[in-house]
Image (spheres, rainbow, N blue to C red):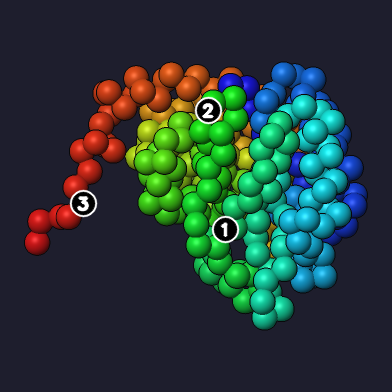
Amino acid sequence: MRIALSQLSTGSDPEKNLRLIEEWTSRAAEAGARVVVFPEASMACFGSPLTDVAEPLDGPWADAVRNIADSAGVVVVAGMFTPAPGRRVTNTLLATGHGIEAAYDKIHLYDAFGYAESETVAAGSRTVTIDVDGVRLGLATCYDVRFPELFRAHADAGAVATLLAASWGAGPGKLDQWELLVRARALDATVWVAAVDQADPAASGAEVRGAAPTGIGHSRVVGPDGTVRHRLDAEPGLLVADVDVDEVAAVREKISVLANRRSELPG
């Protein structure tokens, strides 16, 4: 399966971001991608007034993404915000196109490194997988990467890959953690991980202010054995990679961490 990771920088205007999604989807489709994955907060970057831009899944922004996916003949996965009770939003990954229609609400909220996502965002409560051309793919968002249980749940559900959309926070050691965590989640669930981050705004000359996580780039595709197969640097870029789904079974024969799990540890 050919997957494209669209490492771009989104701004605060959802309409301008739609034009970026249309442009990058067209480029990915021309390169033969079946699935095009955009970062978390593709609708509007963090630091924007999220309750003002949030729309339901049947709203005009999501419908525009559907039209982009259908026109290009691909599956598009993109981060958006949907309304939630109590003047909060839900951090949602929309997966649409090629007969696919699904949405994943981020389960693990980024209450770390001085940022409190839970103040404005409501947590999701269920795992989501999609089937594209007979291949099952799990959906995850940013801070989820610190929690191996979600990636193992994808594997238990039959997924051979997880699509991870992020807007990673910058700071000392954060790039090292991103690289380590993406590789670890691939290895301890023995799945492919296709991880796309927002590009580093500073790499395009933008001034970064405040503590909002606006991305550091370094998107990558990691094999089920934990090795990095493809990667980008900090600036915007399109990564197109072929994922060998048969490799998952071969790796699991050698690295049987899923089969060797103990449901209860000795006391």
Instruction: Please give the label number shown on residue 263.
Output: 3
Q: 10 Å neighbourhood of mark 2: few (<14), some, or many (≥20)?
A: few
Q: Quadrant of the C terminus?
A: bottom left
Is 103 or 150 nearer to us in this picture? 103
Name which residue type carries label 3: Ser
Element marked by disc 3:
loop
Q: Position of residue 52 (x, y in %)?
A: 82, 70
67 left or right of 33? right
Residue at horizontal 26 percent and vertical 23 percent from the top: 254
Q: Is residue 64 visible?
A: yes
Q: Earlier in the sequence, mark 2 or mark 1?
A: 1
Cβ atoms at labels 2 and 1 below 8 Å apart = no
Name which residue type carries label 1: Lys
Residue marked by disc 2: 135
Q: Position of residue 18 (x, y in %)?
A: 86, 46
Is 1 or 44 nearer to us in this picture? 1
Element marked by disc 1:
loop
Disc 3 from disc 2: Cα separation: 27 Å
Disc 2 from disc 1: Cα separation: 22 Å
Q: Is residue 179 visible?
A: no
Residue at horizontal 53 percent and vertical 36 percent from the top: 137
Give the vertical position of 175 relative to 116 (above or below).
above
